[in-house]
Image: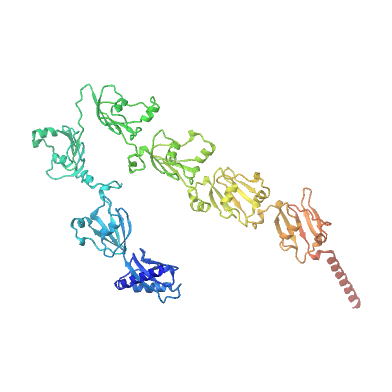
Amino acid sequence: MMRYLICLLFLFCGLLLGTAHANQTLSPGDVLNIQLPGEAAFIEPFDVNDRSQVLLPEIGLVSVAGLTEQEAEDVVRDALSSVYRNLDQFSLNVLSDEIRVRVLGYVDSPGTVSLSPDANIQMAIAAAGGLKAGAQLDSLLVNRNDDSIPVNYKAYLDSGDLSLLPPLQGGDTVFVPAAPQLGNVEIKFDAASLVEAGDASQETGLTLFGEFRNPGTFSYREEMTVVDAIMRAGGVTRYADVTKIRIITGDQSYLWDLKAYLDSGEKAQLPDIKPGSIVFAPIEVDDIETNQRSVYIMGEVKAPGAYENPHGAGFVDVLANAGGPTRFADTTQIRVLRESGASLHVDLVQFSANPALHPLPDIGTGDVIFVPEKIDFNENSWLKVTGDRAIRIIGAVYNPGRFEWNDSMGFLDVLAHAGGPNQEANLSNIRILRQGAGDSNLTRFNLEAFINEGGDFSKLPRLQAGDTIIIDELPKDPHDNKASWTRLAAEDSIYIFGQVGAPGRYAFNNQMGILDIISAADGPNGDANLRQVRISHRDGETANVTKFDLALYFETGDESLLPQVVAGDVIYFPKLTADWLDHPPEHVVRLMGEVNAPGRYTFSQEMSLLDLLAEAGGPTDRAYIERIMIVNTSCCGDESQAFNLRDYVNDPQGNPLPMLRAGDTVYVPNDDDSTPSQMRQGLRDVLSVVTLVVLGAAL
């Protein structure tokens, strides 16, 4: 009862809206009420998808693009008539005519949204979660078919003029770009701080850094003084040494005393600045006596700044004077900068492990000690690591990527840092690519053999900064192997051809045997000759082919019969009906004479004369089975014996079967060769002679 009430409600709504939708064309987002009494699948309404299609039960997708309500009813009725017989009470009504619009770009929830037909861009952006901080409001685009309509959303927000927003249509795409200031890395955006940090490039603006409240690069204006530029940066901090402000204009660098200018007020003391000028405000330090020296400590230390130290103070003394490194410091990459321009690398970790081998440098007047921050490779800051400090690992590892390198690290350290190889990794052919030209820039390493056989750690590959470690994936199944075998090195593969389920090239290692690779190829098929399997061994200097009787292994289970195969070998399964040369004489029995299928037959110890005759289809109707001849081959010459098959059938115990061996020949004579037949032929010959004599005498 409830279902029928719902149908009546939808029908009533459709009647109310029928007049309004009669002349409108359907578009993505519309909701249709399709009435087909007696069919439960048509109780719920149907949505028109983004491709203007309706998914009908037992019919599938039916396009209603650009159709009116009446046209859509005719199209749907025609589609349903192929499955449903009674369509007398069928009807179609549009319940709602929403439009579907995609909102992409710099919004919180990009995707497809449903809107009313009179909705505008602001409603579409609101339905997509709103704009993200940093969206460029003056360059929105509305893409409609092959056209792009630019929209200045900023002008609309400033004026409220709705005419600046073009009307939306179903299928439109609204794209919101990001502000150019964001660069190519997404950051937490704050418009106020971005403006304070500068609004111009270094070539066309003034760059102020150091002890300013808001350092950055700012636009240059005509008749702008250095004081105006300082005020644009928010003024100096209380730590600034205003007596030693450094100004660089073009190729000229000089000091300027802001305090002296403020005391005198003489404009002649103002230095000239122009686009591209640089202004630096240093930290104020106490005057240093002549018997002392000043060093600067920056970065991740407890108290960075300038410090005075007596002569003879060492590197550790200066670092301890600044409170020592913080827990965020990278103590393996400390740099000492000197006035001469030289840069020294200091690794406190290596120093603590072996002070004699890694001594610390002496600290002189004016030296700068910089303690960098640790790199978190989960953030975008990984670009801080230069190429001479990084190593890459790609492929089948749990955490591929670019990692900071240190000379104390080894091959296994880097592999463990990347999470280790995953289950699909091909450890037998790891490649190490080194920057440089020639064949020497590629090294291969078999980690699988190293792990299984307990390799020598001194033979692990030697890495250096800039190397790339590549670990390929193994095929996920034998059939996938044929699609990706070219990624496998030939020396790590084995070939299998002939009468098998899936011939081809397969990955192979030292832990696999011949049964493993035959199983991977789906095993031999019904046409395979299991007794004549051939294996071509290609690992030696000369050609070497062995033959393998797989049927004998199945009969005996003797593991010693299984040959050893290695990567590079070729396994071939011939056909049972292959050329007779595939069967040497010592392995076959020859059957000739009056049988249905004379020929050569592969022989086994379990075969008898009856098996051989049955394999050949039995004797023919003209066969003389009372004297079947068997020629046995032995070391001392061939021996022949006769066998009466009829007597054996009548009395098996009294007439045993003759022994049959490989290399023997069996001949089933014709009935004309029998003794009674020959006697009858002789009698006929005698009668013919007598008849001729009598006729001659009569004549």
**Is 414 in front, or is 540?**
414
In the displayed structure, 140 sits above or below 294; it is below
Identify the image quadrant of residue 541. Answer: top right
Is 627 left, or right, of 503 in this rendering? right
Is 213 left, or right, of 431 in this rendering? left
Instruction: State the quadrant of the C terminus.
Output: bottom right
Identify the image quadrant of residue 111. Answer: bottom left
Is 290 left, or right, of 459 in this rendering? left
Instruction: State the quadrant of the N terminus.
Output: bottom left
Most extreme residue toward the right is 697
Identify the image quadrant of residue 149. Answer: bottom left
Colouring chosen for the image of the structure: rainbow
Q: Position of residue 273 (x, y in %)?
A: 15, 40
Q: Position of residue 330 (x, y in %)?
A: 34, 34
Q: Position of residue 463 (x, y in %)?
A: 42, 37
**Is 321 in front, or is 581?**
321
Q: Residue at x 32, y 54 (%)?
A: 109
Q: Is residue 181 visible?
A: yes
**Is 600 in front, or is 543?**
600
Most extreme residue toward the front is 1
Q: Is residue 591 visible?
A: no
Most extreme residue toward the bottom is 699
Q: Position of residue 365 (x, y in %)?
A: 25, 26
Q: Residue at x 68, y 48 (%)?
A: 556
In the displayed structure, 637 sits above or below 56; it is above
- Mark count: 0
